[in-house]
Amino acid sequence: MTYDAIIIGGGAAGLFCAIEAGKRGRRTLVIEHNQQVGRKILISGGGRCNFTNLDTTPENFISENPHFCKSALARFTPADFIRLVRKYRIDYYEKKLGQLFCRDNSRQIVDMLLAECSRAGVEIKVGCKVDAMSSDNRFRLDTTLGQLEAENVVIATGGLSYPKIGATGFGYKIADQFGIERTKTRPSLVALVANVPGGHSKLAGISVDAIAACGKNSFRENILFTHRGLSGPAILQISNYWKSGDSVSIDLLPETGVRELLEANRDRTQKTAANFISEFLPQRFVEHLAGSSFPNKPLNKLNDAEIDRIAKA
Ligand SMILES: Cc1cc2nc3c(=O)[nH]c(=O)nc-3n(C[C@H](O)[C@H](O)[C@H](O)COP(=O)(O)OP(=O)(O)OC[C@H]3O[C@@H](n4cnc5c(N)ncnc54)[C@H](O)[C@@H]3O)c2cc1C
């Protein structure tokens, strides 16, 4: 069977590419080795798919070729995707910072992409694995459903994360086979393993609005203490910039510093430092931090050295 375009991988990228090829009148086939397309979309955004961000700019993307994002975003904007979502009457909401999520579930986004594929005349084969690919004047694919041929092949098999739901290194294998240079892979958008003073178990589950910074990059969102270190949106973002040996700093009181806060309120409250700071940070966290090291006396009785000790804790 011969196609104008075969797209290997039925994820977000592959389905979208297929829709555009189909709209241009190309005889298009998507090959997906899972029994269903879009499994990563289904788990995205905690099952509600953060399908676009209102203020997306090319600067939000990390790329060896920043110009690619400029042209891609100029040709298809967040507003274009929102228009598509509205066309399918998918109810959505802004969670925060311009992040748009489905109100019901991510399945709606997969169904929308499948409906668009169908309108564009795209054929989809699921449960079909590509074992090998060769090319002379056209591409030949050996698949579990037989041999297929195409004028053009798009590799949309995604990255390596989440092999349990179908991720493979197929794209990298093909790049190597065809002598295409590729960048080194490394973990991205991941939690960090870290030593937390006093151990993790007492802090696990606590979430704090904070600034996580590494070098000249910083993100303000929640951080989450885990049993092994830190996670949460700000940590996932900063993990993209962290390299072995770098330090990550966390500002738990972004609006003001602890020292400034204590000094400004020194004469205004009878509360202990721990009780006072608990008004700004989760109590369980402050109790852990305070331990036996915060002086157990009212704020207005603290001397400069004691304030200094608390600020450095
Ligand atoms: C937990 C989690 C939450 C996320 N949340 C969001 C979010 O809310 N918003 C957002 O924008 N992004 C989110 N992402 C990222 C987003 O899901 C991915 O960037 C996106 O799905 C990548 O799409 P893709 O098409 O490039 O790759 P994939 O979705 O990985 O698709 C590749 C497809 O190729 C198939 N395949 C692989 N090898 C072969 C082969 N040899 N033959 C045939 N088929 C093959 C795979 O089965 C897969 O279906 C999240 C990711 C994760 C892991």
Image (cartoon, rainbow, N blue to C red):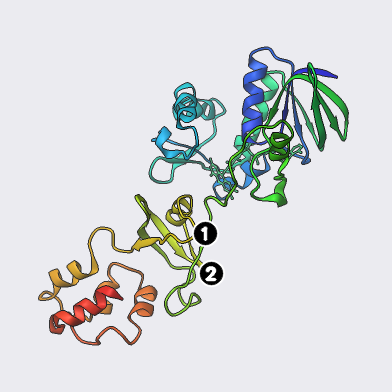
Query: Who comes first in sequence, dot 2 or dot 1?
Result: 1
Q: Which mark is residue 101?
A: none
Decide: few, some or many residues near mark 2? Use Cα within 10 Å; few <14, some 14-19, many ≥20. some
Q: Does 254 appear above or below 144? A: below
Q: Hey, which quadrant is residue 212 in on the image?
A: bottom left
Quadrant location of the N terminus? top right
Decide: is 239 above or below 31: below
Q: What residue lies at 33% left-to-right and 64% top-to-bottom? A: 252
Residue named by callout 2? 228
Which residue of the protein is positioned furthest toward the left in this rendering? 267
- Judge left or right: residue 159 versus residue 32: left
Q: Which residue is mark 1?
A: 191
227 is higher (above) or lower (below) than 82: below
Residue at the image position 36 percent from the left and 79 percent from the top: 287
Can you see residue 222? Answer: yes
Please, what secondary structure does the residue beneath circle 1 have?
Answer: loop
Res. 309 image quadrant:
bottom left
In this rendered view, identify the residue nearer to me: 168 or 79. 168
Residue 220's x, y, as percent? 36, 53
Answer above or below: position of 235 versus 111: below
Residue furthest toward the top? 25
Answer yes or no: do the residues labelled 2 and 1 have beta carbons within 8 Å?
yes
Q: Position of residue 282 (x, y in %)?
A: 36, 70
Label 2 beta carbon less than 8 Å to ligand 1:
no
